[in-house]
Image: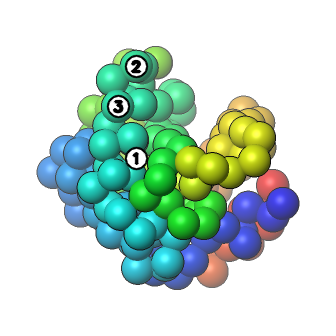
Amino acid sequence: MKITELLDEKSIFIPLEASDKENCIKSMIDGLAAAGCVSDKSAYLETVLNREKTGSTGIGFGVAIPHGKSKGVTTAGLAFAKLTRPMDWQSIDGNPVSVVIMIAVPEEAAGNEHLQILIAISRKLIDEDFRNRLMEVENSQQLFSLLETI
């Protein structure tokens, strides 16, 4: 599975102006719907917000990875946002988030596809050089080039 195959221009937001976490999540879900991954935005939103209640998806290093497996998702997809200003995400390191990567997976997906995607991205985020380059992306082409390394 190539991460870049899950990403569509319609679900990339560089930059994204969002007032809070929920507003950010809704904007990204709109992008996933435009890309054809999400058929029921409210069902997927409920899944993502419920996941946030169990523990923050702010993994540290200025990155959040909200995700969910939902009937509202027709096909696996990713959304990416580089926020215009850092926002509180109740991250595990206490720092605000500047980059958000959303993972959407159909509820009936075989196995734990969303976990495989999450693990692949998380492993790469351990690399400081990768994180720095991720924070510096200025357009979708730079993002695709960087994500090709996953």
Residue bearing the label numbered 3: 50
Residue bearing the label numbered 2: 54
Q: Which mark is residue 131?
A: none
Q: Residues within 10 Å of mark 2 (few under 14, many from 20)?
A: few
Q: What element does badge 2 sit on?
A: helix
Q: CA distance from mark 2 to mark 3?
A: 7 Å
Residue 142 rendering spot, x and y as whole percentages: 63, 74
Contact (Cβ within 8 Å) of mark 3 with mark 1: no
Residue 32 rendering spot, x and y as whole percentages: 45, 68
For residue 127, which quarter of the picture?
A: top right
Q: What element does badge 3 sit on?
A: helix
* Residue 99 visible, this orientation: no
Contact (Cβ within 8 Å) of mark 1 with mark 2: no
Contact (Cβ within 8 Å) of mark 2 with mark 3: yes
The amino acid pointed to by label 1 is: Ser
Judge left or right: residue 123 versus residue 95: right
Q: Quadrant of the N terminus?
A: bottom right
Q: Residue at x 58, y 54 (%)?
A: 106
Residue 109 rendering spot, x and y as whole percentages: 68, 51
N-term-proximal mark, 1 vs 2: 2
Q: Quadrant of the C terminus?
A: bottom right
The amino acid pointed to by label 3 is: Asn
The amino acid pointed to by label 2 is: Thr
Q: What element does badge 1 sit on?
A: strand
Residue bearing the label numbered 1: 98
Judge left or right: residue 47 versus residue 65: left
Judge left or right: residue 107 versus residue 72: right
